[in-house]
Image: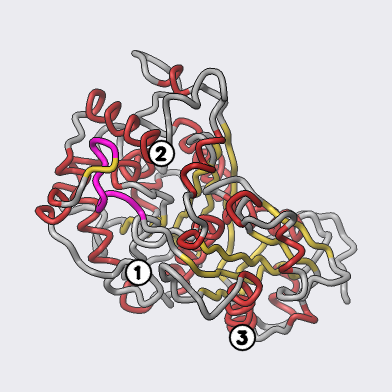
């Protein structure tokens, strides 16, 4: 096993990507088998073996959703982590991106030259996940109001309607766009195209969010191999570079986000915007609206894609709805948003944000297949977690 001795910061690249096909159920695979499936694909893509991995960062949902205490122990052998550095990460919906950040830190700090990130989820098999997710709120001030993550983000939609003039038809346009993209992605869970009329005909979950405005409960795995620039050059590997990476959290109660002139208005994604600003500064991106060709943004509900677009600097505040009406954000536009179909079409929570990074990497690698954004050289990814409070962002370049 070879360890990098220098502590000088180094560039970090992605050299291998693996994703299973995402479905509602996978009766043929348990958690370790699901993760191992993605790992095998990522290692094959990188031309490496488990013995080459110097550390493993494991992306996994909370034990309460899995029904197993210390569930990461099940995955140690599946990812070849025995007697190696092994870390489990969980930050809610942003878990997958936080996992990539932890692996990046291993390499950038000079501790390792090559690190495996891997994870899987069986959200569709976890029973009533919303009853568990209700525990993320403060028990005194918040829990009785947002009974589920759906009602939490329905309140965000209402704020966006009040503040920015967003409509239910605008929300339906997001679903239509993402389903068009997902139909081109063989890994996506929901691949059937829909119309605005079909979105409106679906039942309400929590006004104004309807069934087709919401993400599915998906099962699947994802893995990536990250490596130092020196390792990549010595082994003559192809890579996509992680040039910007940041996380930012906010601690506002929901009630503190629903008045005039609040810093972190619930209509928007204040901390995500700060996270993107830091990632862009690290990557040297000055004008994301002109420099970014593809964006894989974590948006599990149609309305949340708008504030993710604006937080990423791809549209002025409150203007993303009008831009979508004009045909922006589709494949072939200046910036394609969620060309894979996004979280709205595939949501295996523990790896959803990792899939955003993987899909962004495939875009700038030119390997996204039928959902490739032409000429993509710079792409971004994001992840949201917790009470709409934990945000991560990444910039990837060819």
Q: Nearer the viewer, mark 2 or mark 1?
A: 2
Could you tell whether 8 is left or right of 26 in the image? Answer: right
Q: Residues within 10 Å of mark 1 (few under 14, many from 20)?
A: few
The x, y position of residue 22, in whole percent, is 44, 71
The x, y position of residue 133, in whole percent, is 52, 41
The x, y position of residue 104, in whole percent, is 69, 57
Quarter of the rendering occupied by the N terminus: bottom right
User: Mark 2 to mark 1: distance in Å?
Assistant: 23 Å
Is 207 part of what is drawn in magenta?
yes
Task: Point out the stretch of residues depicted in magenta.
Answer: 206-215
Name the disc covering residue 375, or none.
1
Could you tell me which secondary element the residue under label 1 belongs to? loop
Could you tell me which secondary element the residue under label 3 belongs to? helix
Is 273 part of what is drawn in magenta?
no
Picture residue at 73% right of the left edge, 67% below the top? 74
Picture residue at 50% right of the left edge, 69% below the top? 220
Could you tell whether 67 is left or right of 307 in the image? Answer: right
Frontmost residue, 27 versus 364: 27
- The image quadrant of residue 38 is bottom right
**Colour setting:** secondary structure
User: Mark 2 to mark 3: distance in Å?
Assistant: 35 Å
Residue carrying label 2: 311
The disc, 2 or 3, on the residue closer to the chain's N-terminal end is: 3
Residue carrying label 3: 44
The x, y position of residue 235, in whole percent, is 72, 82
């Amino acid at each position: 096993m070879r360890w990098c001795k220098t502590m000088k910061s180094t560039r970090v690249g992605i050299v291998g990507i693996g994703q299973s096909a995402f479905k509602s159920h996978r009766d043929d695979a348990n958690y370790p088998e699901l993760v191992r499936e993605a790992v095998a694909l990522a290692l094959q893509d990188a031309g490496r073996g488990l013995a080459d991995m110097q550390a493993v960062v494991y992306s996994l949902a909370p034990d309460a959703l899995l029904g197993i205490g210390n569930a990461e122990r099940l995955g140690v052998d599946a990812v070849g982590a025995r007697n190696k550095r092994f870390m489990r990460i969980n930050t809610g919906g942003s878990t997958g991106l936080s996992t990539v950040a932890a692996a990046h830190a291993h390499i950038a700090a000079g501790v390792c030259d090559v690190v495996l990130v891997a994870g899987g989820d069986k959200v569709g098999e976890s029973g009533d996940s919303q009853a568990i997710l209700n525990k993320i709120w403060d028990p005194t001030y918040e829990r009785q109001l947002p009974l589920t993550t759906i009602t939490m983000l329905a309140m965000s939609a209402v704020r966006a309607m009040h503040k920015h003039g967003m409509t239910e038809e605008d929300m339906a346009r997001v679903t239509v766009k993402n389903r068009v993209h997902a139909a081109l992605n063989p890994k996506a869970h929901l691949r059937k195209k829909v119309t605005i009329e079909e979105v409106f005909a679906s039942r309400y979950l929590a006004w104004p969010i309807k069934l087709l405005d919401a993400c599915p409960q998906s099962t699947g795995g994802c893995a990536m191999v990250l490596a130092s620039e020196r390792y990549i050059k010595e082994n003559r590997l192809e890579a996509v570079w992680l040039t910007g990476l940041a996380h930012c959290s906010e601690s506002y109660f929901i009630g503190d986000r629903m008045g005039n002139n609040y810093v972190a208005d619930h209509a928007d994604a204040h901390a995500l915007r700060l996270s993107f600003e830091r990632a862009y500064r690290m990557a040297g991106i000055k004008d994301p609206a002109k420099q970014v060709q593809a964006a894989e943004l974590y948006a599990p509900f149609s309305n949340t894609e708008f504030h993710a677009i604006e937080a990423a600097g791809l549209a002025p505040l409150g203007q993303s709805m009008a831009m979508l009406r004009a045909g922006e954000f589709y494949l072939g536009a200046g910036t394609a948003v969620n060309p894979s179909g996004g979280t709205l079409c595939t949501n295996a929570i523990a790896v959803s944000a990792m899939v955003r990074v993987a899909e962004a990497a495939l875009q700038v690698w030119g390997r996204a297949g039928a959902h490739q954004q032409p000429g993509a050289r710079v792409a971004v990814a994001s992840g949201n977690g917790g009470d709409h409070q934990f945000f991560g962002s990444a910039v990837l370049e060819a």
